[in-house]
Structure formats: structure tokens, C-alpha cells
Amino acid sequence: MRKLKFLLLIAPAFFITIGCQKKDDLDRLGDLDVSKPAAIGGSLLAGYQDGALYTKGQENSIPALLFAQMALYSDLNFELPLIEQEKENGIGWNLFQTQSTFRKRSRLELTIGADGTPSLGPVFQIFPNNDLADLANNYADLGGHYQCIPFARTADLLDSDLGISIADGGSNAFYHRFAANPGVSTPADELSNYAPSFVLASLGMEDIFNFAMFGADNQTLANSSDFEATVDDILGKIIQNGTKGVLINIPEIDDLPFFNLIPYNAAPLDAAIAQQLTQLNNLSGFPHITFQEGNNPFVIFDDEHPTGRRQLMLGERVLFSLPLNLVSENLVGIQNPMPQNFVLTLQQLSTIRSATLQYNQVIEKMAAKYDLALFDLRSFVKQKSMGVQWNAINYNLDFVSGGFISLDGLFPTQKGASLVTNGIIKSINQKYGSNLPNVNCANCDAVLFPN
């Protein structure tokens, strides 16, 4: 008798339930109890991709794929707070905040440049206001097992203020949607009260990514000791009575397109313009800023420099959040210095790399302390830079064409999420002696090209 699986898409949540169970010839789960699955983390586990949270990305997120696979071999229930009103557009945090608070997902579109040259690239629209139905508190009865909150840092998972809505002056738009008691609940306590039998956790990635993708501007990064204390506090609350699970470590930002797509010297000038700009800077008291024919480093604001501005150096990064029309129309980075939130300096990059290494050491230590499986996402992402073949299709970290990273340049596509899920399954099998098979998600999208 074949196992009967029901996938019910019922508002307000996505349910995975199972009936008429029958095991195959292999004991797929072994001693694992997955009857009460749970997930806690940030954008990666929430299914945030293409710069937004949208329904299909949530349905094919890493926790949904993992627990659907486990549900083939055990009775379980796992619910997602689905985006409903904007399910196709999604709702994302606009990194260019002077434009709007929220944006829609990016899509590939053919655009025509000022010189008449067509190009294919990601385009998104903004929401003109913050009055979005999907940001209302509609999922307070979710049960506490789902705590995947885009942009929530590790310390935020212990902070009841995380549930204060944007409308009431809060800083996170996503936890309020499904907090049991907004402004009082904390994600860690909700999960503790749920008492999960199996936990999927991604801790620390949001800390590193928030710091990096906002150009370290008005961002803080906890030292490794504070990070360890916070992770220990969270896991101490939720790992109880033999709870099993898996911790995911943090990839290096250097491997992701968001930090590599725009060269530090992508300011092409002809000889005449280069000479004029050099003379202008010399007369304005910035003789250290010079230009020449060809590609030139962008000019940035830098509080550490005696004059407050300088040109970027080799190895420094321009972020993908930079609106290119600011360069072409307003000469930002050429005549007018580029704001700090669009760049990472050598010192900031050193801070990020050091923190990533230290955080990953903490995660490894905590996995051992709480007897959890450890999935090495850092190494997994590095391997994808060389490419991997799955179902006769090659996936790598190349932007758009690689299929693994979505159009935000940061988080996996649905196909990428399925590959990550399979890596997690391998770690679970190795740790607990289970025999879960890989996910083969035919419904998962890579980067979608226009018709």
C-alpha cells in the first residue's frame, strides 16, 4: 500500500499532514521523533528570495521541503504564515529606504539603456505606502513551531519588541504577522512553549548579512562572546527532553553575487571628462581624487579620511543595492561621493570575515553541546561556486544564469533551496543514522526568464 500524502493549501496557513502511513523496506527515520517539527531563523529559512517574501518561495522554503520529506515517513503537522494578498508580488524590505519602506519581488525584464542598448536584468516595483493587508497579525494561532523571520538577528529572537508592528514603531515587519502576542511574545519562548521534537535552526546569518548588506551603516555586530551567550540561551530554551535537530552555519559574503556584481572601478570616462573631474576635485580641495581615461574607482564618503571622501581601493565592494540610475543620472560615485550604505571598505570586510569565522566556531560548539547535527552551509556554498549538476542541470553561483542564487543576489532560488535541503538531509542522516532520501522538487523554480 502506497503512503497517502495530503498537501492542503488552506488559508491562513500551509499545512503538511499525513494519513494512512506505511513504511517502506528501509527504516527511514530510525529513532528520530519528528512528530513536532519546528524551525527558527531568518530570511534563509523563511524562503525570502528575489528580494521579497512570497507564497511560492515560502511553500518551497527549506523547512517546508525538509518537513514534507519527513512527512512521507511520519505523522506531522507544519504550518506556514503564507503571504496571501500579495502572494505573487510578495513583500520585501527595500534596502533603498529613501524611496519606500517595502518593495515587490524582483523579476527579470528586458530594459533599454540610455544609449539604446537592450539588457536583461532584475526589476522591482515599490509599494507606495505601508498599508499592506499581509502585514496584519493574522496567524497568532500558528502554534509557535514556526519562527522564521526575515531580518531578525539572533538577539532579536529573545526580544519581545520584535513583535511590535511597523505601524506602531517597530523595526521588523514580519514577526508581527504571526506572533502569538505581539509586543509580548519572543520567538524563542514561543518555540520553547511548543516543545518541539525536532528543530531546524539558522542562527547568526542575519547578524552578518544585515551588517554587510546595509554597508555597515547604522548597524551593529555582536562580538563572539555575546553571540555565543545568545545562541546558548536560545538553544537552552528549545532543546529539551531529547529534542533533536540541525544547526546551519553561515556562508561567507565574498561568495555571493550581492557583493561582487558591481566592480569597485566601474566608472568609465573619456579623457576629456576625466581631466575636467580631476581639475574640479583639485580646485575643491580634493587633490587625491584623480581620474583617467577608462575605468575609474568610485568616489565615496569616508569619515575616516581627513577630507571626508576618497576613491575606492582594490578589494573594496560596491553593493548590489546601489540604484544604477544614481550613477548614470546623478553622477553618484563620480562627481558626487557614494553614500556609505552602498559600499564595504577593507576594514569593514575584515570585520565581517572575522565575525563569520568566529560565529561559525560558536555554531559548531553549540551543535556539539546540544548534540545536534551541523550543516556546513559555508562549505556548501563555496562548492557551488564551482558548480554542481542536479537532474542533468548545472547550478552555480553565477548571477541569473547559475540558477542557485535568486535575483536578490543573496538567498537561494527554490531550486537552490532544494539543494540546500538535500545537504541538510545528508547531515541529519550522518548524525542520527536515518535514511531520509533526497528531495526532488519538480515544482521548485530557479530564476524565471520572461516569456
Image (cartoon, rainbow, N blue to C red):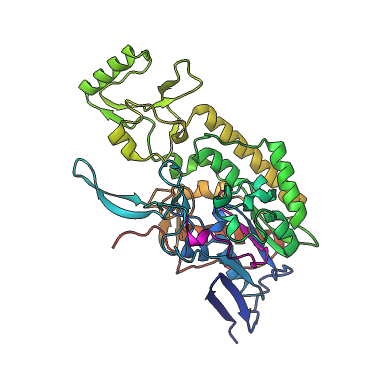
Specify the farthest residue to the bottom.
1
- Residue 316: x %, y % from top left: 45, 30
State the quadrant of the C terminus. Answer: bottom left
- Residue 168: x %, y % from top left: 58, 50
At x 39%, y 53%, the residue is: 106
| Residue 396, magenta (yes or no) | no
| Residue 133, magenta (yes or no) | yes
Eyeballing the image, is 83 above or below 118? Answer: below
Eyeballing the image, is 103 above or below 37? Answer: above
Specify the farthest residue to the left.
116
At x 51%, y 41%, the residue is: 253
Residue 269 in which image quadrant? top left
Confirm whether residue 188 shows in the render. yes
Q: Main secondary structure of the magenta part?
A: loop
State the quadrant of the N terminus. Answer: bottom right
Residue 4 in which image quadrant? bottom right
Eyeballing the image, is 373 above or below 253? Answer: below
Viewer-proximal residue among 347 and 111: 111
Eyeballing the image, is 31 above or below 278? Answer: below
- Residue 171: x %, y % from top left: 57, 46
Viewer-proximal residue among 445 and 17: 17
Residue 144 in which image quadrant? bottom right
Q: Which residues are magenta?
A: 131-151
